[in-house]
Image (cartoon, grey):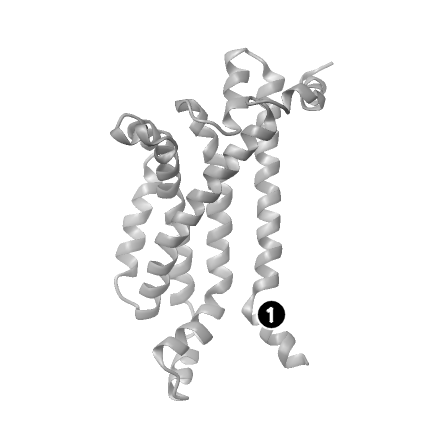
Amino acid sequence: MGVFGETWSWLADGANWSGESGVWHLLGQHLYFSVVSLLVACVIGLPAALYLGHIGKGGALAVNLSNVGRAVPTFAVLALLITTPLRKNGDVPTILALVLFAVPPLLTNAYVGMREVDRSVVEAARGMGMSGRQVFFRVELPLAYPLVMNGVRSATVQVIATATLAAMVGEGGLGRIITAGFNTQSTPQVVAGALIVGLLALLVEGALVLASRLCDPMRRRGAAAAE
């Protein structure tokens, strides 16, 4: 039948989708890890990056420090956290490791987006009497929005893919399908797990692309002006 035929058979088997070890249950765990981690990372990274980009101070240092996290393998961080007292707090080590992994792209893109806003536009807005708050929300943030959302999409896809590592330290998520396939030497199951994770990442990124276009403040302003 071949690997792809056997993979399709595995995916078509309803028994593999139900129960605590089934795809639906593991998908729920995977989404929980990913969504919570991204929300926490956004709360930490975006306000700091946008503010530093607005004032133009300290951003380069913050970006460089956050990028240090990219040099450390996520699995190493996760394995280290599992050995600490945090292990008693259930999913905290997994979420914390994913947060550390998600912050760099969020912080970098948001800061760069703010700093790449045309300074002449900013100065013109200030010359019109806008306060610093008005310049931030009505000029800088709308113009930086595309790069900010690129960072969000990048972090989201990376977190969804990396969350599979949680299974390697005994946590849940779609990674359990892959690790179980390795343990039983079932190549079709490994391929099926990888396909599900890849499809999930593509679907979520597509949804974010659509949402970012619909919520683009410049797009809404253009539509309003056309009316």
Label 1: which residue? 219
Q: Percent from the top left, x then y, of residue 106?
A: 41, 52
* Residue type indicated by callout 1: Arg
- Picture quadrant where residue 54 is located: bottom left
Task: From the top left corner, tell me how far across and down residue 4 is, in percent.
Answer: 69, 21
Spot occupied by residue 164 in the image (x, y as percentages of width and height)? 48, 30
Question: In the rendered view, does 161 fall on the left or right side of 79?
Answer: right
The answer, for residue 191, to whether it is visible in the render is yes
Which residue is drawn at the image coordinates 59% and 16% (left, top)? 187
**Number of numbered markers:** 1
Relative vertical location of residue 28 with respect to residue 138 in this rendering, above or below: above
Quadrant in the picture for the N terminus: top right
Label 1, residues with CA under 10 Å away: few <14, some 14-19, many ≥20: few
Q: Which of 58 and 90 is in front in this view?
A: 90
User: Which residue is situated farthest in the top direction here?
Assistant: 184
Whether residue 57 sits left or right of residue 158 in the image: it is left
Q: In this view, does 211 lie above or below 191?
A: below
Q: Within the image, what quadrant is residue 80 found in?
A: top left
Is 40 placed left or right of 220 in the picture?
left
Picture coordinates of residue 7 (x, y %)? 67, 21
Q: Dividing the image into 4 quarters, which one contains the C terminus?
A: bottom right
Q: Is mark 1 on a helix, strand or loop?
A: helix
Q: Residue 7, can we see it?
A: no
The furthest residue to the bottom: 128
At x 40%, y 39%, the residue is 98
Q: Residue at x 33, y 59 (%)?
A: 48
Relative depth, front residue between 89 and 128: 89
Question: Against 39, is 118 above or below?
Answer: below
Position of residue 68 in the picture relative to residue 113 (left or right) = left
